[in-house]
Image: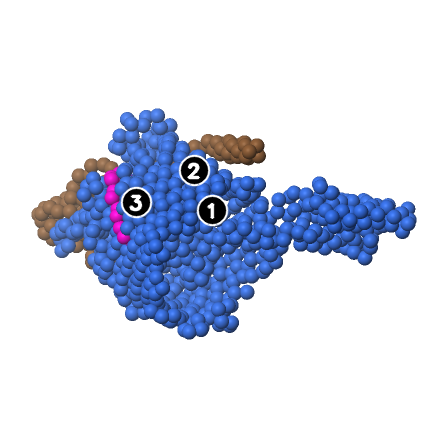
Amino acid sequence: MKKLINLNYSFTFLLVALFLVSCSKDSTPEVIEEQELITTVTLEITAANQPTQSIRWKVDETNNNTVSLKANTDYEVSIGFLDESDPGDVEDITEEVREEADEHQVFYEFSNVSVSYSSSDTDTLDGDGNPVFIKSIWNASTTGSGIIRAYLIHEPTTKNSSTRAGFGGETDVEIDIPITVIE
Amino acid sequence: MRHHFLQFFILLLLIVGSPQLYSQFCDFTLKGNVFDLHDNTPIFSALVTIEGTTFLSQTDELGNYKIQGLCPGIYTLLIKHPKCKSLKRKINFRSNKEINFELEHHINELEEIIISDSKLEVINSSVKESRLNTDQITQFSSRSLTDAINTFSGVSVLKTGSAIAKPLIHGMFGSRVGIVANGIRLRDQEWGSDHSPNIDLNAFENVQVVKGSAALKYGGDTAGGIIVLSPYKLFLKDSLFGQTVLNGATNGRGGGITSKIMKSTSNGYYFKGQLSAKRFGDLSTPEYVLSNTGMKEFNFSFKIGRSKVLRGWEFNYSRYQNEAGILRAAHIGNVQDLFNALQSEFPLRINPFTYGVESPKQQGVHQNIQFSYFKILKNKAKWEWNYNYQVNQRKEFDVRRGLRSEIPAIDLKLQTQSLTGNYSWKKTFDWNFDWGINGLLEDNFSNPNTGIKRLIPDYLKYELGSYFLGTYKPNNNFSWDWGVRLDAIYLEAQKYYKTSDWIDRGYDRQYPEFEMKNLGTQILTNPQARFFNFAAHTGFSSRIGPSIETSMSYVLSQRAPNASELFSDGLHHSLASIEYGNLRLQKETTHKILTSISKSAMAYRFSIEPYVSYTDNYIYIAPVGLEQTIRGAFPVWQYEVTDALLWGIDANLDFKFSDQFNLDINASYIHAEDLKNNLPLINIPPLNSSQSIKYTSPKKRYDIELVNHFVAKQNRFSDFNFTVNILQDGAIVKQIVDVSTPPEAYHNLDVLFSMYLGKVNQSKTILRFMFYNITQTNYRDYLNRMRFYANEIGFNAQVQLVLKY
């Protein structure tokens, strides 16, 4: 029986030792600033003889800026992606999208209004010469109000499609912005 | 009487013989002790002689021997005792020397202990267990532990594709199922449904599955069940044997090799080394390639030990390393992508076959170091000590922008140290007791270099547990067992919350003491939780008449929420959902009653095992709302509690038509209900059954087995569907994303053919041809998370060569 007790003592001792070793961990974990976050989408809309419109859509904010277009007028629309999670260090993700033009695609869909768009002369092209639509020319044909749905697609399975499903790939951005088209 | 004569004779020799024969250079002394190999007690009256001379000495009560007047030289010593095996040892003798010898008792004296120790112990006599033997393990050598135990009724598989699979016992998985290897609980990142246990089946020779938490020795928190993997026990005899298994399979165009060698010696030392490697490329369904589903695995282990029957030690090291691809098409960006994937009959990304694995993928390395010691005391009580250190590293890679796909999105390192002591003893022959204590320390580190917020935070966990178990077995027809276990758990995490989340969930008011540092958008907190868990078990098994056996047992188990349930915080790419832990969770308590009745006769054996369990505070994940993100609205799933009722039946029938034909039918059914919301629980296996018919040739030269698996449609499920607004032809259309409806029922047919080459009944070489899904059935499985994207794998032909030596 004495041996048994001895063993118990040694066990307790080992346990205590084990726990003491462990208690040395006191460092606080590092803060992680998320790297590939997109928090903000901007649309810069310009046309000859029209005031420039700057639309900002930011996550966690109320976004009710409306785009307003004149029918049958060409507008140049420049889309931008920002990481504003750290207000002191705003990152322009658009640059990254341009650099990886092969793996990215900007795509727009419209509801209730009819807007056609094409690549602008200043647009970025991918390795095969396909436009990424970072800069595009819009032209609205019907009047009314509806929604612009802007997408940034990562690794699309094809670069030529007219529907979101057709492009495949993963959606990195999908936001809705109200639009009105006037005469 | 004879000994005395011998002693006298030796004395006479020593006195009379030595001075005459040797000169003054020859006055060196050889002395030492002779011990018993098994218990280190001195051996009295062993004879130590030098071959070719007349020198000899007999040991006294303390085992001492002494030979004086020796010249330098090379001698062969012979140590003898009538009750022991003789020992011969060559020595180079230069000057006075002390040498100790260990003699081994003739093995028959220890036979009783050896036999009782070498038998595979029944883990719990009142709960029926299922077992896999070496042969069955070999059959699954190129697959996984989970696949192997899926053959038991009541055990299913929760999968993410084919390579990532975890066991589901009685409708429960993860922390509710314990895996015990070499007597130690496996400590890996068991929390997610998409993690397979980091263990190599090939390192073990026996697998036992105990349903329900009736193995209190290993923990009181596994309401689902426990899987115990154990190696062969090697005993004091000179032996060297091993096995090599070669596998090749058409689906995935890969294969594997596993090899092991075991050596034991008569002085108690033993060694075992094992390694296995496997590699597969993309798997295929009958119609298409499942892109990025390749995998590779490399494992090795060794152990060295010495067993002297009455005491022994063992050192064990094992390393497991795997990389598994996740179906590329399952990596999606948002809810609309998920909707599109569900609409499509085919995965949205199908590439040509390749062996390469890209993101998304998982990598795991699990290392285990173990040291154990046992000692059998005079009263046949046994002490066992086990120290164990496990390191589990897990990396998960997502498809990311930039070159970040190479940086893991999840990078965790879990280190666990544990110390276990077990004291078992018998009181008279009928009563067996076990008492044990277990201390554990766990440290999880989440590497911040991922650039993505931690899914699981850094934490420390301490556990201290103790159990007391007893078995009363007055005869072979009845046994009663019981056990209690207490565990104290303390968990301390350091976690950054998004400040808005911390406030939205009311944690700032409920847990202000956890707040450490407010960094504006993020807040560092130090959540702490304490749990005291109680587990108990009692049950009996009894034989009624010559052929009927019944058992019944009650198990109470308590489980503390795991780190994932408390803290998880992240995006699930294959389900387009955000998952949140819940700091308010309390321990869950499960009451389970298991019964079994079986009847065996000459031609058949059948058993049915009904069970019912009720869990108070059952932790589960459920959709709680939507969260607006830059990728649109995402469904948010959060860990919640309810009361759960699960009941089910496992049944088995084994029918022997003749020595040649055998029919085996397994079936199981589970009914699981969320009692608070009156809804069925998610991820519960549907009714399933397997039927096999086996023909064995008259001289057992070969056998052929036809197996049909049937899985019904799960008709009991909760509707967790949600809607998504899709733009179609210039108009917004509301569409339902159906993530709830289970797939249709299916049949799956396999054919297994084994040839036993060489001597009848002692075959050293086995050749197997195994054909799976021979009808090329296209189907999806409810328990596979990839079911939203692709079918299960199609036809697979596998060749296996087993070489024993």
Residue indicated by mark 2: B467
Residue located at (71% from left, 41% from top): B61
Label 3 is found on which chain of the structure?
A: B
Query: Which shade of the palette goes to chain B?
Result: blue
User: Residue B236 appears at what percent x and percent y?
Assistant: 59, 54
Same chain under badges 2 and 1? The reply is yes
Q: State the image quarter where residue A157 is shown.
A: bottom left
> Which stretch is magenta?
B639-650
Residue indicated by mark 3: B593
In terms of sequence position, does the residue under pointer 3 or pointer 2 come before the other?
A: 2
Residue located at (48% from left, 44% from top): B429
Circle 1: residue type = Gly
In the image, is residue B427 above or below residue B75?
A: above
Q: Secondary structure at mark 2?
A: strand
User: Residue B297 appears at what percent x and percent y?
Assistant: 45, 57
Image quarter where the C terminus of chain B lies is bottom right
Same chain under badges 3 and 1? The reply is yes
Label 1 is found on which chain of the structure?
A: B
Same chain under badges 3 and 2? The reply is yes
User: Residue B206 appears at what percent x and percent y?
Assistant: 45, 55
